């Protein structure tokens, strides 16, 4: 009996007679698939103090400039306070930024 690569067995009884082809069951191994888990990490990025100071100071300077154009020296003081307060609110609202990092 001869085995062919495809898993078929050939029975040759005599060289002058045609061969009989018989299929043989082959065993297929099933390997488990690897599961890839997307690992995500949340990183909180905080703003430097110097950047926070620049935001608040820039807002105060912008408010002072607008106040000076609108109402002179007293308007500049009021505009600086208003601009600084607005800059502080903005800075505290946005100083922690959450970033999702895929690994």
Image: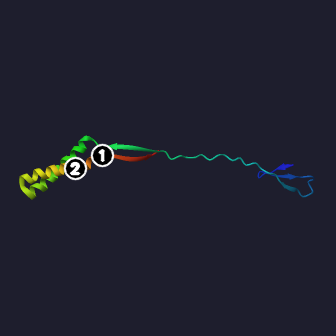
- The tag earlier along the polypeptide, 1 or 2, is 2
Identify the element where label 1 is drawn.
loop
Judging from the image, the colouring scheme is rainbow
Mark 2 surroundings within 10 Å by alpha-carbon count, few (fewer than 14), some (14 through 19), many (20 or more): many
Q: Horizontal and vertical percent for residue 59?
A: 19, 51
Residue 4 relative to residue 90: left or right: right
Q: Nearer the viewer, residue 70 or 4?
A: 70
Q: Nearer the viewer, residue 87 or 46?
A: 87
Q: Nearer the viewer, residue 101 or 68?
A: 68
Residue 83 relative to residue 98: left or right: left
Res 87 label: 2
Give the residue displayed 20% in from the left and 49% down from the top: 85
Q: CA distance from mark 1 to mark 2?
A: 12 Å
Q: Horizontal and vertical percent for residue 84?
A: 18, 48
Give the residue displayed 53% in from the left and 46% down from the top: 37
The answer to the question of whether label 1 and label 2 lie on touching residues, with beta carbons closer than 8 A, is: no
Res 95 label: 1
Res 68 label: none
Q: Horizontal and vertical percent for residue 19?
A: 88, 56
Up-down: is 98 above or below 71?
Answer: above
Give the residue displayed 49% in from the left and 45% down from the top: 39
Mark 1 surroundings within 10 Å by alpha-carbon count, few (fewer than 14), some (14 through 19), many (20 or more): some
Q: How many marks?
A: 2
Residue 18 relative to residue 45: left or right: right
Up-down: is 48 above or below 23?
Answer: above
Identify the element where label 2 is drawn.
helix
Image quarter of residue 53: top left
């Amino acid at each position: 009996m001869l085995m062919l690569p495809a898993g078929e067995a050939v029975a040759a009884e005599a060289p002058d007679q045609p061969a009989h082809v018989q299929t043989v069951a082959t065993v297929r191994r099933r390997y488990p698939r690897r599961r890839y888990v997307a690992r995500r990490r949340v990183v909180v990025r905080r703003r430097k103090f110097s950047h926070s100071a620049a935001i608040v100071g820039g807002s105060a300077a912008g408010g002072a400039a607008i106040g000076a154009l609108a109402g002179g020296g007293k308007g500049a003081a009021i505009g600086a306070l208003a601009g600084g307060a607005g800059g502080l609110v903005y800075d505290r609202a946005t100083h922690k930024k959450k970033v999702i990092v895929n690994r």
